[in-house]
Amino acid sequence: TLIRLEDYVAPIYWIRTVELSFDLDPAKTLVTSKMQIQRNAAVPHGPLRLHGEELTLLRVLINGESVSFRQEGHELIIEGAPDADFTLEIRNTCAPEKNTALSGLYTSGGGFFTQCEAEGFRRITYFLDRPDVMAVYTVTLRADQAKYPVLLSNGNLLETGELDNGRHFAKWHDPFPKPSYLFALVAADLVSREQRIRTRAGKDHLLQVYVRRGDLEKTEHAMNSLIASVVWDEARFGLPLDLERFMVVGVSDFNMGAMENKGLNIFNTSALLASAATATDADFHRIESIVAHEYFHNWTGNRVTCRDWFQLSLKEGLTVFRDQEFSQDMAAAPSARAVCRIQDVRALRSGQFPEDAGAMAHPVRPDSYVEINNFYTATVYNKGAEVVRMYQTLVGRAGFEAGMKLYFERHDGQAVTCDDFAAAMADANPGSALATRLEAFKRWYVQAGTPRVQARGSYDAETQTYTLTLRQTLPDTPGQTHKQAQVIPVAMGLLGADGQALPLQLQGEAAAQGSERVLVLEQLEQSFVFVNVASAPVPSLLRGFSAPVLLDDGLSDTELLMLLQHDADAFNRWEAGQRLALARIIGAVRAGAALQLDAAFIQAMRAVLRHAELDPAFKALALTLPDEAYIAEQLAAAGHSVDPQAIHAAVEAAHIQLADALHEDWAWAFDAHQVRGGYQPTPQQAGQRALSNQALSMLVLHATRSGTTVWPGRAYQRFKDASNMTDRLGALSALVNAHAELAVPALERFHAQFRHEPLVVDKWFALQGRAAEVDGKTFARVKQLTQHPDFTLKNPNRARSLIFSLCMFNPAAFHRSDAAGYVFWAEQVLQLDAINPQVAGRLARVMDRWNVLAQPYRDAAREAIARVAAKPELSNDVREIIERALALD
Ligand code: ARG
Ligand code: ZN
C-alpha cells in the first residue's frame, strides 16, 4: 500500500516509558515489554493498533489483566483500551538467527545486533513504531556469559550481575525520550578501545569503540575521528555531547554504513576499521566522515527527530551537510577544502542526478512511498545536504549558526518537520535573502528533478556594461509537471582579460561590492546588469557549486581554458577542465565517431599536471575524466538516447590518448610524488598517493599499448612491496585494468595474503567486478566469482563488492548487446530478495534509467525488468522499484 504525506495523523496513543527485557537466544529470543500508555486527547478516540512483524505473540495484559485483542496483517489491535493512562504488557518471541534481512534483532559473527531504522523495531516487539512516539527506555539484557560477555544498550549502565546456568544480565537506562528507530542492543564477544575526554562544558565522558578481538588495532582512526567530531560540534555549533558514555560498535553484516542509535552507534565494519595495511586513503576519509555523521545525528536526528518518514531529509540532509562541513574543516588548507567539495559534487552528479531524472525521481521530501527503506536515497541525503548548504549561502555562516540555535531552542525533544527547520532559519534571519522568499525556497522540498540553468552574457563596450541573463527550466518527473520557479543562489565572479578578478557593481549600486557575490535567480528568467566593466569579461558561475543544478553557460573553449588557468574559485577551475573533457566526449558520442583529443586540450591537461603550485590531490581530480553516469545524464538531458558502450569507448579513448600523449609527464609525476616517511592518512599524503597511483595506471596502460615492460614490472614490484593498502591496491588496479598477464599472479597473491581480512577480500572482489572490460572477460570472470568459496550474497558487503560493482559501476561490462548482463542482474535481484529485501531493492535500482537507453539495450532491459516483475512473491522493496521502472514505458 502507498503511504502518503497528506494522510499524516498524530497517534491516538503515546507511549511514555517502556521497560524491555530480553532473554537472548539465537533461535528464540523472549522479549517482554512493559509500556506506560497515555491517550492523545488532541485526536479522536480509536483502537490501539500496534505494529508487529515476524513475531510470535505470547500474551497481552492491560493493567495486569488479560485483554481481548485481534491480529490483522502486521497489526495487533486492542479495541477496549482504557481512557485513562494504563500499563500494557506484551510478551513475544522472535528468531534472530533466521533474520537474514538484517532489520530488527539479528545475529552476526556469533553475536546479537539490532538495526531499527526505519521500521525494524516492530520485528523485535509490538509497538507504535513511528518516529513521533517518543519514550524513555529501560532495557534488561540476559544472555550466556561466555558467548556474550558484552551486553550493551542505549544510555547509561545501571546494573550488571550473574544469573543461573552461566547466564548474566545488564540493565541500561536512557534518560532521553526517543523514537523506537533509535533503540539498539548488542550482545557479543567484543573488546573496546576507550578514551576519556573532558569537553568545553567541563563534563567528563567515556568514549568506547567495540570490535571483535583481532580488530582492536584498527580502531585508532575511528576513535580519533570521534574525538574530533565531539570537539568540532561544540566549537562550530555549540552542541555538546549529552551522555556520560558514547559507544560505537562494529558489525560485519550490516545493510548500510552505520546507524546513530542514541549513545550506541552501530557501524558496518567497512565504515569503522582501518589500518595502513588494510585500508586505503579513501577508506580513512570515509570512516572519518561516517563517524562524524553518526555522532552529529545525536543533535540533528536524535535530540530533534522527524515527525514522520517523509521528513527524513530533515535529519539526513542536515547531517550530511554537517559532516561535509566537518570534513572540510578537518582538511583545513583551502585547496584541500576544495578537493572535499569536488568529491561531494562528483558523488552528487553521478549518484543523485540520474536518480532525479529516472524512475525513482522524488522530491527531497517525498510525498508518498510503498517501502520507506527505498527512500534512503541520494536525493534525501545528498540533494538534501545541498538544500541545507543553500540556506547557509543565503543567510551566511553566522546566520546559519543563529538559525541552528533557534531550531534547538524551539524543538529540542520534539519530532518535527522540514517546515519547522525552514521557519527557524528564516526567523533567525529576518529580512535575509532567505526570509524574504521562504515559500518559494521551500519548493526545493517538493519539486523533484534537477533544475537546468542557462546563462548567457552580453557585453556592451559603449556603456561598459555586462548583462548576464539567467533562465531556469524545471524538467517533468514521474507524476510532476508544470513546476514553479525555484530559488537558485548563483555564486559568481567575473574575470578580466588577463584572468584577474573584476570588481562587481550591479546597476543601481553606488559602488562595487567585492569580486564575488551571490545572485539569486527566482524567476524563470532574470537579467543582472553589471556596470563599470572595462572589457568583455569571462563569467565564473555557480562557484563552489552553489546550487544542485545543471548549468549551461555557453562558454567557448577559450573561455573555459581561461577559467581553468585563472579562476579564483578552485571548484570552478576543476569544473572548467571537466567541461572541456565533457564537450569532447559528448561530441564524439553524438557524431558516432572515434574521439580524437586536440592539442589544446592535451596541452591544458599537461599544464595542470606540471603546474608548480596546484595541489597533487587537485591535479588528480582535474585529470580524472567525468564519470560515465554523469556523461549519460548530460546526453539524456539534451534529449539523446544513451549508448553506454559508445560513452565508454569515448572515455576509454580519451584515457588512452592522455596516457600516450603525456607519458613523460606521468613518469615525472610518478617519481615526483612518492611519499617519504611513514604512512599518514593526511590530505597531503593522500594527494601524493592519488596522483602517483593515477600516473602509474597511465604508465602501465601506455606501456602495454606500446609493448614495453618497464612500467608493468615496476607496478608489479610496487604491488608486492607497498607498505600500505592505497599503494598496493593502486598498483594492483593498474595491472588488472591494463595488463592481463601480470594481473593473474598479482590477484592470486593478493587473495592469499589477505584471505583472513574480510574487508580486503571485499576489495579483491570489487576490483574484479569493476575491471576494464575486454571481450567479455570481465563479465565471465564475475559470473565465475559468484561460485568462489569466499563469495556469499548473505553478507551485504560481499554482495555489493562483486554484484553491485559490476551492475552499478562497470557500464561497459554490464550493458551487453546479448543482454547477458541484464539476465544476470535479474537473477541476482531475485536471489537477494529472498535473503535481504533492502539490499535487493538497492540492486533493483540499476534499471532506473532503462528507458533512455539506446537499442538494443532498451528492449533487453525492459525484458529483464519484466522477468523480475513476473516473480509472484516479491518484497515491497523490490516491487516498488520494479513497478516504478515499468511505469516509464
Ligand atoms: N540513519 C542512518 C544514517 O544515515 C541510516 C540507516 C538507514 N537504515 C535503513 N535500513 N534504511 O546514518
Ligand atoms: Zn544519517
Image (spheres, grey):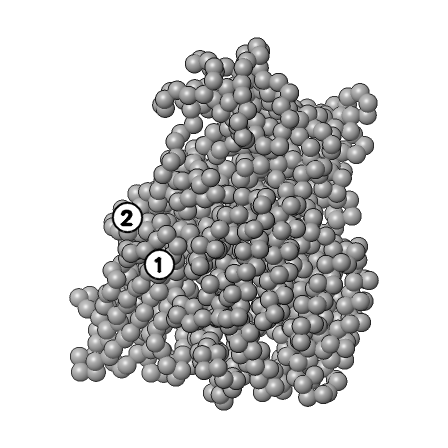
Residue of label 2? 439
Q: Is mark 2 on a helix, strand or loop?
A: helix
Mark toward the start of the polypeptide (1 vs 2): 2
User: Which image quadrant for residue 402?
Assistant: top left
Q: Is mark 1 on a helix, strand or loop?
A: loop
The label shown at residue 476 is 1
The vertical placement of 46 against 95, above or below, is above
Q: Nearer the viewer, residue 290 or 132?
A: 132
Rendered residue at 77%/21% (across/down): 163
The label shown at residue 349 is none
Marks 1 and 2, how far apart at CA: 21 Å
Residue 659 placement (x, y as % from top left): 61, 82
The vertical placement of 319 against 308, above or below, is below
Residue 294 placement (x, y as % from top left): 56, 45
Q: Are marks 1 and 2 in contact (CB under 8 Å)?
A: no
Three-letter residue code for mark 2: Glu
Residue 436 placement (x, y as % from top left): 25, 50
Q: Which of 446 and 874 is in front in this view?
A: 874
User: Which image quadrant for residue 407?
Assistant: top left
Residue extending farthest to the top is: 65
The answer to whether residue 294 shows anywhere in this view is no
Q: Nearer the viewer, residue 3 or 442?
A: 3
Rendered residue at 69%/35% (across/down): 96
Residue 609 placement (x, y as % from top left): 55, 80
Seen in the image, is 8 located left or right of residue 178?
left
